[in-house]
Amino acid sequence: MHRPAQTTMPPSPVRSIELAWLVVLLFVSPARAGAVDASGPVSPGDLTAIERDDAAAEKAAEAGDVRTALKYFDYFGHEQEAFAKATVEYRRARHTLRTAVTDKFGRPAWRRAAASLGSSRRGRDRRRSARREGDVVYVRDGGARHETPYVRDDGVWKVSVREVLLLAVRARIGKDVEYEEADLHVLAGKMAGVLGGRAERLRSIAESVRSGRIGATEQLEQAIKSVRGGGS
């Protein structure tokens, strides 16, 4: 696992709840590797390996195999580990909801729900791009607003928890935001709770779809909006 050097800049307040959905968009919906962007050298072999390892992580998460799924996340400390575990649970809950919605309402309904959750897939979009900064490779799916950062550790490409949190902070507050590593650990711990709550909400919606309490796509859309908006 990569251990970042401590910054010496004074800490600045991070309003983690406002960052919650941005972190979800960045972290739990990793991009698929594609064409290399001219901003940095990323080999086609690395892109293929990223896609392979990302697919393996998704498969393990959907199966509820937390131990295996965590092998595809780079984290340091208890808070970042908790965040990674919560992310696995969120992905599993999303898969459960996808199955329930697809079975009852069909694939178009799920595509709309997935878009609302920020987890829609665009297939092999030629607009995908990737760039490298140091040891980090950033991949952006076609049409996505944000990149997903990956680092290679022991031959495996892993989503970097630290870089995801830092991207979220910079996107919300500004690229020159001052922080300490401790700020990112605090944010990781708080976001673990946020993601855990969202995962539970997705499981609840899936059960409501199966039981018939949600019997129309309009009801589904309202339920999905409540997840994004933080409603119960």
Image (tube, grey):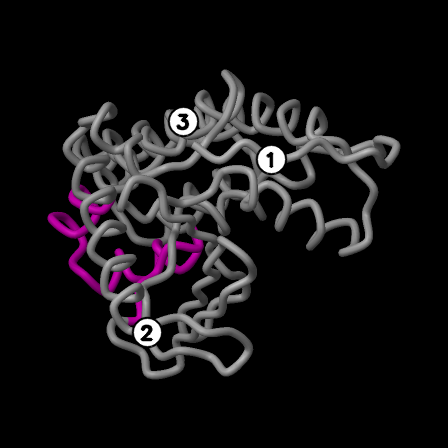
Kindly identify the residue that appears in the image at 70 percent across and 24 percent down: 182
Q: Estimate how packed mark 3 is, as few (under 14), some (14 to 19) or many (20 or more) residues with alpha carbons within 10 Å.
A: many
Image coordinates of residue 191 in percent, x first then y, are: 56, 29
For marks 2 and 1, the one nearer the N-term is: 1
Which dot, 2 or 3, sits closer to the camera?
A: 2
User: Circles 2 and 3: CB distance less than 8 Å?
Assistant: no
Determine the residue positioned at 37% across, 53% down. Answer: 218
Between circles 1 and 3, the one closer to the viewer is: 1
Q: Which mark is residue 199?
A: none
- Whether pointer 1 and pointer 3 mark residues with C-beta atoms closer than 8 Å, the reply is no
Amino acid type of disc 2? Gly
As drawn, the label of residue 4 is: 1
* N-term-proximal mark, 2 vs 3: 2
Residue 212, given in percent of the width and then of the height, sits at 20, 35
Q: Quadrant of residue 184?
A: top right
156 or 193, nearer to the observer:
156
Element type where label 1 sits in the image: loop
- Residue type of the residue flagged with mark 3: Ala
- Principal SS element in the magenta part? helix
Q: Amino acid at mark 1?
A: Pro
**What residue span does the magenta drawing correspond to?**
98-122
- Of badges 2 and 1, nearer the viewer stands 1
Where does label 2 land, which residue?
A: 34
* Residue pictured at 50% horizontal, 83% vertical: 38
Give the vertical position of 113 relative to 158 (above or below): below
Left or right: where 88 falls relative to 59: right
Q: To which residue does mark 3 refer?
A: 86
Left/right placement of residue 73 relative to residue 24 reads left
Query: Magenta span has 113?
Result: yes
